[in-house]
Structure formats: C-alpha cells, structure tokens
Amino acid sequence: MRVHRADLLVECRETTTNLSRLGRDLARLPDPSRLRVVRQKKVEPLALSGDEAEEALRRRKERVNRVLNNVLACLNHAFDNEKVPTNAAWSKLKRFKGTERPRVRWLDLDETRRLINACAPDFRKIVQGALLTGARWSELRRIRVQDYDSEAGTVLIARTKRKKARHVYLTDEGRRAFVEWTTGSERAAAVFVWAEGSNWGSHDQHRPIAAAREACKLSDDVTFHVLRHYFSRPSMSRSRAKTL
C-alpha cells in the first residue's frame, strides 16, 4: 500500500493506471477470514474451490470497490477545492461490476409478529413504521408530522438515498397508525422518537433490533434493513394490516 500511495502522489497523469493496478492487487489479496496460521506463525490463505472460491473473489472485489470509493472521494474533494488542476486522471476509472449481493431475507407473518412483540415500545413504533412504509432507517427518523397527508393517505419521504423525494401510499392500517402517531403533535415534530422525546440517531437501530431478534429467537440476518422487504412483498399486501 505504501508503494501505491507513493505512486499516486508522483504524477497526477498516472493516477488512473495506478488506481487500476491498486484495485487488481487488492482483489488478489486473501480474505482475512480465510487465513490460517501454520508453523512459525506464517499466515497463508486457505485452499478454496468451486463456489467458495467464486464467492471469496466477489467479496474481495466488493472490498476493493469500497476502498476505491473512499480514495475517489478524497481525490474529488481535492479537485472541488482546487487543490489539483484536473480530475481527468481518475474520472474514467472503472469499478468491478457484479459485486453487490442483494439482501434476500424476507420476514413471514409469524416472524414479523414475534419481532414486533419483542421490541421496546418506542422502538416498536419505528419498526411498525418501517413495515408500513418500506422506508429506510435514515428516512424514518426524519419523518415529521407535517409529512403525513391524511386526505391522500400518503407519507412524504423528503430526504432519500437517491436525493429525490417520494410519497408512500399507505394501507388502511398504515393510515390508522399515522393518525394515532400524529394527532395532537406539532407539525414540525418528529413522528418517531425515543421514549424520553429525543430524536433517534443515525445508528441507534442496531442494538434494539439485535435485542428484539435475540428475544424472539430470529436468525442474525434479520436486520432493520430487512423490514423494508416486507412492505414490498406482494403476497403480504392483503394480510399486512392483520399482522401490525
């Protein structure tokens, strides 16, 4: 890594080549979880074959893409602040394709009911909000009372991952829930807050969802993000109200 860092700083016009070489070299590095210690504490990669080897390569390429994202963010920041004259050296750099593995975990009705019952009251509310809207954690914690339109039965997600606002159409159960959650509150107030009234933080979902998951004996792959899938699952649309 020191060699690559030095190369990147030598001449800007060579950055594209150096970054591409850095990506290829990182992709060849073994996954730390696939290493074993042998005699004299020498570390070597475990032998893999077939599907395991293919999955290990995918993970390494995905890791390279994450590293390059950080490197490119730094370079673009330097360019935006006029620290370098041009971004031509890295603007054409290509990332590895097909490295993202979709999260395919679905909650069935029984799992959803058990998870809701295992949550603390304040966290249960935002879990239900995720199930009823399909919104991300970052979107839910920003929803205000004024974002709920009782006449249209929609919730405005003003700040999204794609930087484009959207409206979520609620089921009858969703409407009843938001009426209960917003009635009597100030328009600028957050809908989902801690029990003492403070706003949820950007990472405050991890511990509560883990505690609820353990309490109701669900697998470790049940994360807060998985709740979004329940909203978009067609087979759940008719029975969603009965569950929540």
Image (tube, rainbow, N blue to C red):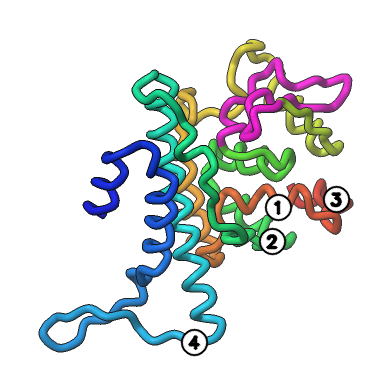
> What is the CA distance from the residue labelled 2 to the residue labelled 3?
14 Å
On the image, the x and y values in percent for residue 186 come to 63, 11
Q: Which mark is residue 237?
A: 3
Image: 95 above or below 165: below
Span shown in magenta: 138-164
Do the CB atoms of the residues marked 2 and 1 lie less than 8 Å apart? yes
Residue behind mark 4: 49
Rounded to the nearest whole Å, what is the CA distance between mark 4 and mark 3?
42 Å
Which residue is tagged 2? Answer: 106
Mark 4 residue element: loop
Q: Nearer the viewer, residue 73 or 162?
A: 73
Q: Name which residue type carries label 4.
A: Ser
Residue at the limit of the structure toward the left, as seen here: 40
Mark 2 vs mark 4, CA separation in Å: 30 Å
Identity, as a three-letter code, of the amino acid under mark 2:
Trp
Mark 2 or mark 1, earlier in chain: 2
Q: Would you place residue 202 above or below residue 118 in this image?
A: above
Q: Earlier in the sequence, mark 4 or mark 3?
A: 4
The numbered mark at residue 229 is 1
Q: Considering the numbered disc 3 on the image, is that residue within a helix, a strand or a loop? A: loop
Helix or strand or loop: what does disc 2 sit on? loop
Image: 89 above or below 225 = above
Residue 207: in sight, yes or no?
A: no
